[in-house]
Amino acid sequence: MSGDGDNGLGTGGEPGERAAEVRAEEARDATAGRVTDADTGTAARLQKLFEGHRLTPTQRRIAHCMVRRAADAPFLSSVELAELAGVSQPSVTRFAVALGFDGYPALRRHLREVAPTEKAGDDGTANEYQQAVQAEIDNLRHLAAALADPSPVIEAGRLFATSRPLPVLGLRAATAQAAGFTYFARKVHPDVRLLDEGGTMLPDRIDAAVRAGATTLLCFALPRHPREVVEALAYAQGAGLTVVTVADSAFAPVARHTDLLLPAAVGTGLAFDTACAPMLLGRVLLEAMCDALPDAQARLEEFDARAAARGLFVD
C-alpha cells in the first residue's frame, strides 16, 4: 500500500477500461497494505516469465500488478486479478495467452507449481514489523542478484557523466530518492538539476535543460505513479533526451517512456511503502557515474578541503 493520495495512472487501457482504472486504483490501494509481503523469489520468477514478450499497455499493467502482489498471484482468480489491475476479465485471459498459456487457469497452475510454500527460515512467529524488515532484506538480495550483470548500471553511469546538465526527476513518493541522488551527484558532476516539483513549469525546466546541453534525464519513479511523471518522461523523450528510470518494477507505468529501466522493488507490508532497494540502487548509480567521470576523485578531494577549511562538519 502507498499512503500517497495520487489517482494518476501511467498507461492507457483497452476500450471501455479507462473509466474502471481509477476506481480499481482506489480499491487496491485501500487493501494493499494489509496483505503479506510479496515473496521476492516469486517476484523474480514473475519478472523472468514476463520478459521477452511484447505486451500491450494493458498487459503490462497486469504484469506490474502481479509483480507487486507476487505472494498472492498464484492464488488470485482472473476476476480478482482484473479488479486489482483495473482491467477487464477478458484482458487477463488474453494476457495469459500472450505469455504462451492456454488460458489464465494454466498460468495460475504454473505459478502454483513454481511458488514456494513458505519462506525459508520463516516459523510464523515474526511480527508485522519484523516481516517488513525481512521483506526489505529480500528486496536487497534480489537487487544484488540483478547487479550480477553490471552493464546496465555502467551504461547509465556513462550517460549521466556525459550529460551536461543532468536533470534528475522525482515527484511525490520519489522526491527523497531524487533529492538524495542530486545532493551527492553535485559533489562530482558540474551541473545536476533537481526536478522535484510538478505543474506547468516542469516541461519548461526540461526544455531549459535541453537548451543547456542535457542529453540524459534520470527519473526515480515509485508507487503510486503520478500521471504527471509519465507525461514528463514522454515529453523528455520527445525533446530528445535519453530517459533512465529507477522504478519498482520493469512493468511499472513509466516503462513505456523509458530507454533504460533499472528495477528495484519496494516493500508493501507497512502503511507506507519502504524503498531501501531504490535508494541503494541510486547510490550504485552514483558510483558508476563517478567511475565514468575522470575528475570525480579530484572534485571530491576539493570538496573535502573546502569543507575542512570552513569547519563544515563536526566529525
Image (spheres, helix red, strand yellow):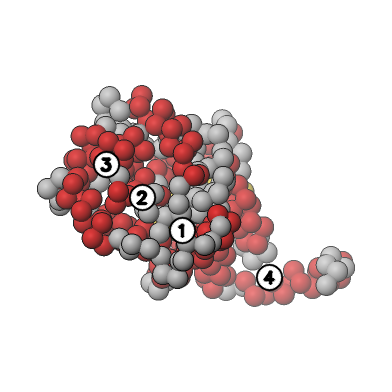
Q: Which mark is residue 77?
A: 3
Q: Considering only order in the chain, which callout, 4 or 2, is on the residue closer to the N terminus?
A: 2
Mark nearer the viewer, 4 or 3 = 3
Does the rendering let one see residue 248? no
Q: Which residue is mark 4?
A: 299
Position of residue 79 relative to residue 222, above or below, is: above
Q: Which of 101/301 is in front?
A: 101
Q: Which mark is residue 72?
A: 2
Position of residue 171 relative to residue 130, above or below, is: above
| Tag 4: amino acid | Arg
- SS at mark 3 in the image: loop
* Classed neighbour count for the residue bearing mark 4: other residues with Cα under 10 Å, few (<14), some (14–19), many (≥20): some
Q: Is residue 111 left or right of residue 181?
A: left
Residue 283, horizontal then vertical, whole percent: 57, 65
Discs 3, 1 touching: Cβ within 8 Å = no
Q: Is residue 310 left or right of residue 7?
A: right
Q: Which mark is residue 131?
A: none
- SS at mark 1 in the image: loop
What is the distance, in whole Å, between disc 4 and disc 1 at their CAs?
Answer: 29 Å
